[in-house]
Image: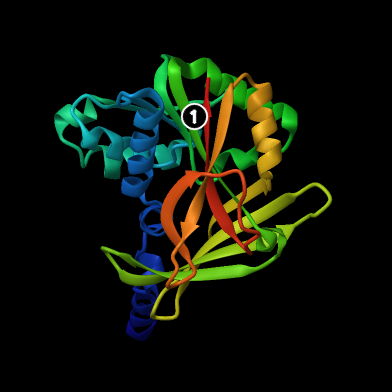
């Protein structure tokens, strides 16, 4: 009996069993500081003023929304997601980490992003390719029209996109990351299935740990891989007057992305790329 108990405790003590998938996601996927720096700088360049009210669509844990109100005492953030479990985690870990005054300036709402907006905002974000869940032009066009209705007259819509010839492949990539609780871990991006006929794809995120344990299918996505011409056309059809593609520059020493995004009309035909689309009314 004691031996079995010892075995059970040993199994329960794996790093995978101790890890929190939402914390791992935030530590491996999100860079709220760089993202919000980009949003702030581009909005000022466009409008000559700073944005104050931001809405994070498909917000998940509301990490970006909470980071936004920490940047300035006038900032207000609204996070919208339809997943109650993820929102509850965000309220317990991200919202409660803020000061009482900052908490008053954040609303994390369990709602459909297609619903009419509660208020007009300066900025709408749809990041981490979250809108790829809309698989038809009709659905995505409807979402873009709803975003347009949500913006102030000088509001700006920010979204990211990815592509490259490896985006059409069934491959797995990994990257080493660090979590405050468990230390080093490996983030694995698994493009598990891709259908070239309709661009529907299944992508999964797994996490692996130094003790050999794994957290498989921590996150699972059924998407359509949208291409940039499609997105620009749909944004124009939804009523956005200007749509710019912000393409990442290349570090001459490493030949990798340098983290600096500028407006471009031509991009390199790389194996994989990530860019931003910025749409104005």
Q: Mark 1 packing: few (<14 Cα in 10 Å), some, or many (20+)?
A: many
Q: Position of residue 168 (x, y in %)?
A: 71, 59
Tell me the residue that label 1 is attached to. Answer: 157
Q: Name the residue nearer the viewer: 133 or 239.
A: 239
Rendered position, 87 above or below 164: above
Helix, strand or loop status at disc 1: strand
Q: Position of residue 86 (x, y in %)?
A: 43, 42
Which quarter of the figure has residue 14?
bottom left
Rendered position, 115 above or below 125: above
Q: Is residue 204 visible?
A: yes
Q: Is residue 63 visible?
A: no
Quadrant in the picture for the N terminus: bottom left
Q: Residue at x 35, y 79 (%)?
A: 10
Going by the image, does 197 lie left or right of 72?
right
Q: Name the residue nearer the viewer: 215 or 142.
A: 142
Q: Name the residue nearer the viewer: 75 or 107.
A: 75
Q: Position of residue 259 (x, y in %)?
A: 41, 55
- Looking at the picture, the colour scheme in use is rainbow
Looking at this view, name the residue that lies furthest to the bottom: 3
Rendered position, 265 above or below 153: below
Q: Residue at x 39, y 67 (%)?
A: 17
Q: Position of residue 106 (x, y in %)?
A: 29, 28
Q: Residue at x 50, y 46 (%)?
A: 128
Going by the image, does 204 lie left or right of 152?
right
């Amino acid at each position: 009996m004691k031996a079995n108990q010892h075995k059970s405790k040993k199994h329960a003590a794996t790093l995978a069993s101790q890890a929190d998938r939402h914390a791992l996601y935030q530590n491996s996927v999100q860079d709220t500081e760089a993202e919000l720096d980009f949003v702030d700088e581009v909005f000022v360049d466009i409008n000559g003023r700073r944005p104050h009210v931001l809405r994070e669509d498909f917000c998940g844990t509301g990490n970006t929304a909470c980071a936004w109100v920490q940047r300035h005492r006038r900032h207000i953030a609204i996070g919208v997601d339809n997943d109650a479990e993820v929102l509850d985690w965000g309220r317990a870990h991200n919202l409660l980490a803020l000061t009482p005054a900052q908490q008053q300036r954040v609303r994390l709402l369990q709602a459909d992003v297609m619903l009419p907006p509660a208020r007009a905002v300066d900025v709408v974000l749809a990041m981490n390719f979250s809108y790829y869940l809309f698989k038809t032009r009709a659905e995505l066009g409807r979402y873009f029209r709803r975003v347009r209705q949500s913006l102030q007259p000088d509001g700006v819509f920010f979204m990211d996109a990815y592509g490259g010839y490896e985006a059409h492949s069934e491959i797995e990539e990994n990257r080493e990351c660090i979590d405050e609780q468990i230390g080093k871990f490996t983030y694995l991006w698994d493009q598990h299935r891709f259908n070239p006929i309709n661009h529907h794809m299944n992508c999964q995120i797994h996490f692996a740990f130094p003790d050999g344990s794994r957290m498989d299918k921590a996150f699972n996505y059924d998407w359509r891989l949208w291409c940039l011409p499609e997105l620009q056309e749909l944004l124009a059809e939804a009523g956005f007057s200007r749509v710019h593609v912000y393409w990442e520059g290349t570090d001459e020493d490493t030949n990798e992305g340098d983290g600096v995004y500028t407006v471009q009309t031509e991009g390199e035909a790389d194996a994989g790329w990530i860019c931003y689309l910025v749409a104005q009314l």
